[in-house]
Image (cartoon, helix red, strand yellow):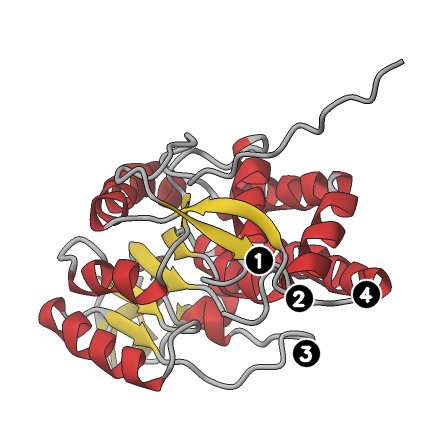
């Protein structure tokens, strides 16, 4: 029997539930920690970024309108799919971050657990951030959280999988849709995550994954009038300042980059970062001398 040729994987973007090549036709070489070639990844253009925003906006109504319980079910399904492809991600994370197989396995296991953690928060965050407010008058005053809209996410540069999921999962868990810029030097785990999302129950357009030069893709997203918020986790100090200035044009919510140990159990900060609070007043009736009348 003759030796067979290996089938090399072609990595593509994930936009609107489909796998397009970059509109520009460009690619760039992705190398492992030792400088060995791993694959050619799409080099996204500004047009790709704009297409991703259109897809995210189109998906926002259905995703934000789904029940929180249903979103939790969908996110849990993603964790199931990640578990089934665990070995692939262990290999990709090991190559991307220069880790031993055992350490990469620990990263992947923590990542799957992180996804489950955020899946569990979908129908609980409203109770934590909303509720009835005491007011001096004959009114009910009720506050409830609502998703901000389309969120641009600059994934962490060094933590190609655990960091990626730690910033993407809370965005969609709360009903937002996301345009994600993968780690520039280690985009393969993010592009493979797109394949998992496509074969789970996440509607197309809820998460859109772009790869390429972070600064080149982030600039049009920060200035885009239909992007409501931006997470600068993967930006350095100079790029973050530039993007904050661009984001101010339409008053985007901005989550600034910060030092994070992604192995630590997260709080609710990233869940609440991209939520708006809606408050409703409702009359209770007349308040007489003897007390309330409903």
Q: Earlier in the sequence, mark 4 or mark 1?
A: 1
Q: Earlier in the sequence, mark 2 or mark 4?
A: 2
Cα–Cα gap, marks 4 and 3: 21 Å
Q: Nearer the viewer, mark 1 or mark 3?
A: 1
Position of residue 155 measured from the top left corner of the image (x, y, whole percent): 46, 64
Asked if disc 1 and disc 3 are in contact, CB closer than 8 Å, the reply is no
Dot label at residue 34: 2
Residue found 51% across the figure and 64% down from its top: 125
Of residues 176 and 152, which is closer to you in this image? 152
Dot label at residue 100: 4
Residue found 62% across the figure and 42% down from its top: 78
Position of residue 187 measured from the top left corner of the image (x, y, whole percent): 51, 55
Q: Earlier in the sequence, mark 3 or mark 2?
A: 2
Dot label at residue 31: 1
Asked if disc 2 and disc 1 are in contact, CB closer than 8 Å, the reply is yes
**Residue farthest along the right direction in this orientation:** 1
- Disc 1 secondary structure class: strand
Q: Earlier in the sequence, mark 1 or mark 3?
A: 1
- Disc 2 secondary structure class: loop
Cα–Cα gap, marks 2 and 1: 8 Å
Residue found 26% across the figure and 47% down from its top: 53
Quadrant in which residue 106 is drawn: bottom right
- Mark 3, residue position: 264
């Amino acid at each position: 029997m003759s030796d067979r040729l290996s089938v090399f994987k072609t990595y593509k973007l994930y936009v609107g539930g489909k796998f397009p090549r970059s509109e520009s036709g460009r690619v760039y070489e992705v190398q492992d920690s030792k400088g060995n070639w791993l694959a050619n990844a799409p080099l996204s253009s500004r047009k790709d970024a704009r297409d991703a925003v259109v897809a995210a906006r189109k998906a926002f109504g259905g995703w934000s309108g789904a029940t929180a319980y249903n979103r939790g079910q969908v996110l849990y399904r993603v964790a199931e799919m990640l578990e089934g492809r665990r070995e692939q991600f262990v290999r990709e994370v090991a190559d991307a971050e220069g880790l031993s197989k055992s350490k990469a396995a620990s990263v992947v296991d923590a990542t799957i657990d992180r996804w489950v953690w955020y899946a569990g928060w979908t129908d609980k965050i409203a109770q934590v951030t909303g509720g009835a407010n005491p007011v001096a008058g004959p009114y009910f005053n009720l506050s409830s959280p609502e998703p901000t809209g389309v969120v641009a996410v600059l994934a962490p540069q060094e933590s190609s999988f655990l960091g990626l999921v730690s910033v993407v999962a809370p965005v969609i868990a709360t009903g937002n849709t996301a345009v994600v810029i993968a780690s520039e030097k280690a985009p393969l785990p993010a592009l493979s995550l797109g394949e998992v999302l496509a074969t789970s129950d996440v509607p197309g357009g809820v998460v859109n994954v772009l790869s390429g030069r972070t600064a080149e893709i982030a600039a049009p997203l920060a200035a885009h009038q239909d992007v409501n918020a931006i997470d600068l986790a993967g930006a350095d100090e100079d790029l973050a300042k530039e993007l904050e200035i661009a984001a101010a044009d339409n008053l985007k919510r901005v989550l600034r980059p910060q030092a994070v140990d992604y192995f630590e159990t997260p709080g609710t900060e990233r869940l609440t970062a991209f939520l708006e609070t809606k408050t409703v007043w409702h009359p209770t009736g007349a308040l007489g001398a003897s007390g309330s009348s409903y």
